[in-house]
Image (tube, rainbow, N blue to C red):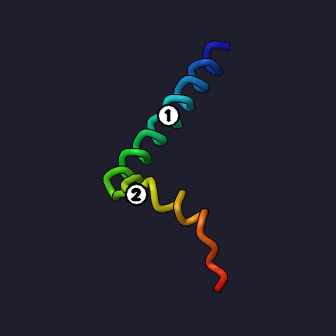
């Protein structure tokens, strides 16, 4: 019974750590720098 609990704890910690690492990597690459352009782009129509 405790083996399953330990396994679930390890898996949860690994998932959380991988999400944190992915966030830090994307933040350093500039993924979250421009927050206004996608909202403005949705307003304008591309059809001419």
Question: Where the C terminus falls, by quadrant?
Answer: bottom right
Picture coordinates of residue 23 (x, y %)? 42, 45
Categorize mark 1 by other alpha carbons within 10 Å: few (<14), some (14-19), many (20+).
Answer: few
Question: Where the N terminus falls, by quadrant?
Answer: top right
Task: Identify the residue at the far left of this view.
Answer: 28
Secondary element under disc 2, as helix, strand or loop, is: loop
In the image, residue 12 above or below residue 29: above
Q: Toward the viewer: 35 or 4?
A: 35
Q: Which residue is mark 2?
A: 34
Where residue 42 sits, quadrant-wise, is bottom right
Q: Which residue sits at x=49%, y=34%?
A: 16
- Mark 1 and mark 2 residues within 8 Å of each other at the beta carbon: no
Secondary element under disc 1, as helix, strand or loop, is: helix
Sooner in the amino-acid sequence: mark 1 or mark 2: 1
In the image, residue 4 above or below residue 43: above
Q: Toward the viewer: 6 or 16?
A: 16
Task: Identify the residue at the far top of this view.
Answer: 2
Say left or right for 20 vs 43.
Answer: left
Q: Which residue sits at x=43%, y=39%?
A: 20
Q: Which residue sits at x=54%, y=57%?
A: 39
Q: Toward the viewer: 33 or 15?
A: 33
Q: Which residue is mark 1?
A: 16
- Which of discs 1 and 2 lies nearer the camera? The answer is 2
Q: CA separation, marks 1 and 2?
A: 26 Å
Picture coordinates of residue 14 (x, y %)? 49, 35
């Amino acid at each position: 019974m405790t083996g399953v609990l330990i396994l679930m704890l390890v898996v949860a910690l690994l998932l959380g750590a991988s999400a944190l690492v992915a966030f830090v990597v994307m933040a350093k690459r500039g993924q979250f720098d421009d927050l206004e352009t996608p909202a403005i782009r949705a307003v304008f129509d591309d059809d001419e």
